[in-house]
Amino acid sequence: MKTMNDGGSSMTPKEKAKLERHGFVEMSIQQFLGLSDAEMELIELRVEVNAFVVDRAAEQGLTPAALAKSASLLARDVKKALRKDPDVPFDHLFACFFALGGRRADLAKRKNPKKKKPLVPAR
């Protein structure tokens, strides 16, 4: 399927209008994939917790082995989390999150960036 994503970058209104004349429509990722609000929340939560883990581990200069020890996980599981592997279970992500000093309040303060809408062919 042919898709275009303006990504909020360098697409001009003229280029966008041309794509729309050729049958492309603007929609969110959620709409494009047909995800429920709950599914989007889970995806966004995973992304945010994972970003926190990666950033905080780098800030603290922790090796995967050191983080694994403090999170009571195997080093290979922490390495997967640090690579942002989507197969890492939520409980492993949260074990790392809390071992790195994360608190529930950190998640409550999460930012809700403006969602970018890609241009995709009309169905």
Image (cartoon, grey):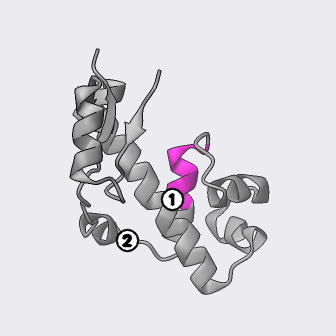
Q: Residue furthest top?
A: 123
Whether tag 1 and tag 2 are in contact, CB under 8 A, the answer is: no
Label 1 amino acid? Asn
Q: Toward the viewer: 111 or 92?
A: 111
122 relative to 26, above or below: above
- Residue 117 is situated, as x and y percent measured from the top left of the image, at 28, 43
- At a point 47% along the width and 21% down the height, the residue shown is 1
Q: Main secondary structure of the magenta part?
A: helix
Q: Amino acid at mark 2?
A: Arg
Q: Is residue 103 above or below residue 41?
A: below
Q: Is residue 4 visible?
A: yes
- Observer-nearest residue: 43 or 98? 43
Q: Nearer the viewer, mark 1 or mark 2?
A: 1
Q: Residues within 10 Å of mark 1 (few under 14, many from 20)?
A: many
* Residue ID at (54%, 55%): 93
Image coordinates for residue 101, horizontal then vertical, percent: 48, 77
Tell me where residue 77 appears, x and y as whole percent.
71, 52
Element type at marker 2?
A: loop
Does residue 82 belong to the magenta stretch? no
Residue at image mark 2: 103
Question: In this figure, which residue is indicated by the disc labeled 1?
Answer: 50
Residue depicted at 74% across the width and 68% down the height: 64
Magenta span: 88-95
Name the image quarter holding residue 100: bottom right
Quarter that holds the C terminus: top left
**x and y percentages locating residue 22 in the rendered image:** 29, 25
Residue 12: which numbered mark, if any? none
Say whether residue 37 is left or right of residue 95.
Answer: left
Alpha carbon distance from label 1 to label 2: 14 Å
Quarter occupied by residue 30: top left
Mark found first going from the N terminus, 1 or 2: 1
